[in-house]
Image (spheres, rainbow, N blue to C red):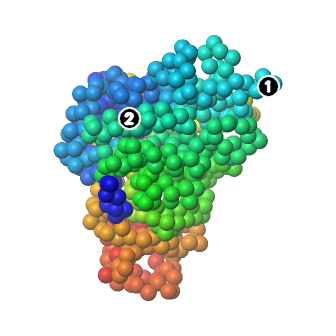
Amino acid sequence: MSKKRDLSELGKKVIYQIYPKSFYDSNDDGIGDIRGIIAKIDYLISLNIDMIWFNPFFISPQNDNGYDIADYYNIDSVFGTMDDFEELVAKLRANHIGVMLDMVFNHCSTSHQWFQKALAGNQKYQNYFYIRSTRKDGSLPTNWQSKFGGPAWSKFGNTDKFYLHLYDPTQADLDWHNPDVRYEAANIINFWQKKGVTGFRFDVFNVTGKSETLVNSNGDETAEKKLYTDTPIVHKYLHELNRASFGQDSQIITVGEMSSTTIANSIDYTNPKNQELSMVFTFHHLKVDYKNGDKWQTIPFDFMKLKELLFSWQESLDKGHGWNALFWNNHDQPRALSRFCNTQTYRIQSAQMLATAIQLLRGTPFIYQGEEIGMLNPDYTSIEEYVDVETKNAYHILQKSGFSENDAFLAVKQKSRDNSRTPMQWTAAKYAGFSHNKPWLASTNQDTINVAAELDHGKIFKFYQKLIALRKSEPLISDGHIMPLLRDDQRVFAYSRYLADSALVVLTNFYDKTTTIELPSKYKRRHGSVILSNYNRTLGELPRVLTLKPYESLVFKFS
Ligand code: NOJ
């Protein structure tokens, strides 16, 4: 039996996320590629990260930017060749950087041969999908809505049946009750593992939890999601997959993207004794600026809710021996800096503060490309500039629901997934040094925010380097327990990380105003030193009362 992974080992790792389409374009076709990533390896090494998660670069029609996979075993020619991929793995490995691939197993592209064979009448492959007849009254098999808008069912070829797609109509849901589907998934993982891949991210894995019999919802979105999300059978699928593939090697790192999951389930997914996953991505903390749970209706972010969510997940996973993936940004989220902070005046301080707040929590931090140089949302002025399928659908649906054209535009401008998908800004050049040709998505603020300027005189990249170095050298960060501090404070997110006889305190001011805090009187520890500060603060002792500057972050270690 394989050795189980030690959580503290996971606590020393930092994972960087690359969106290949937007990282670096080596052949000037306007789209990033694998050789482009190889060209930038020195930059990645200088950050001292341990692993890179790559969004999918498998063969795909790209209707959902690669999350519609047509062949899980090959690289799409837009991104390069298998030889390029093998070179990338070897070069990263030589520099102690692992490769994490994105496994999209809830659905595949309707161009995949499984779906094409099903369409041609092959029963074996029809059983890979949810293909159902209409109800007696002629209506769709269920009333479920696709997450990208519209009904979750589309007509199955020329038949009178329909197939399920929780996302775009070109992303057909796979039926995980079918052991053949589960066998295919394990084979795919084993194939990439043999190529030297040591990490896997599982896309929206917990929506595989559908019942065999699909039933109508009462029309309420939350109730509808519960019919197929995060159900007990997902644990069975994961355990089986773990045993049949990645779990046989204790060095493999896995992360499951878990939609609307619970704390209890997240503990079960990640407690090593259950042999499921190393960690999970959860999203509750990024919904704190949704009005009534609706992503497109933006409200100022609810700081107290954000704190409470982070604290409750941290404390519970600590007690339950679960493990958190820690992140603010990814390819589906607008940039956290643009979302939560006053970047007009305090872009640098707030970037450093956000990084401190999330990265020193208990778990494994993920950094999304461009975060380490403080990239912001682009400033687009027309819907034509957006590419994302979800964004375009939302723009129309919002107008149908009564939004004016302008309000619909403002909503997508704030929340579109394209906000984070803009090309990596390498230089101040016309196309941000990403390509010599017009990129597939435009950049708008590279004149001031770019890697060249940042490495020359910037303060954010260096701060990330310090944070990463601290995680690797400080057991309080990699292994420590968590204790929330100042729970009721309206501006400061603060916590302590502690082990038997040592502790550190992390203080982060989330606002552009100075604010005074008072540490609880039971908090006896005083002497020590500042190990990280974004205002160059030095202290030999942590005073009970302290005034924090706008977006100040301070990490104090007791001696
Ligand atoms: C989650 C991915 O992160 C997102 O980009 C994609 O659209 C959906 N899953 C569907 O695969």
Q: Which residue is mark 1?
A: 136
Q: Quadrant of residue 469?
A: bottom left
Residue where numbered disc 2 is placed: 187
Residue at figure coordinates x 40%, y 80% from the top left: 542
Relative vertical location of residue 281 with respect to residue 113 in this rendering, above or below? below
In-image side of 388 versus 440 (left or right): right
Point 42% across, 71% down: residue: 481
Q: State which quadrant residue 56 falls in.
A: top left
Identity of the residue furthest to the right in this view: 137
Quadrant where the C terminus sits is: bottom left
Q: Is residue 295 above or below residue 154?
A: below
Q: Residue at x 50, y 36 (%)?
A: 179
Residue 383 in view? no
Residue most toward the left? 94
Q: Does residue 228 appear in this view?
A: yes
- Could you say where residue 345 lies in the image, as x and y percent from the top left? 46, 54
Q: Amino acid at mark 1?
A: Lys
Question: Could you tell me which secondary element the residue under label 1 belongs to?
Answer: loop
CA–CA distance between discs 2 and 1?
39 Å
Q: Tell me the element at label 2.
A: helix
| Residue 444 position (above or below residue 126) | below
- Say which residue appears at 74% left-offset and 37% top-offset: 216
Quarter the N terminus occupies? bottom left
Q: Residues within 10 Å of mark 2 (few under 14, many from 20)?
A: some
Q: Residues within 10 Å of mark 1 (few under 14, many from 20)?
A: few
Q: Amino acid at mark 2?
A: Asn
Residue 90 in the image: state x and y as whole percent: 21, 39
- Residue 17 lies, with reference to residue 350, above or below; the image says above
Q: Tell whether 271 sits left or right of 475.
A: right
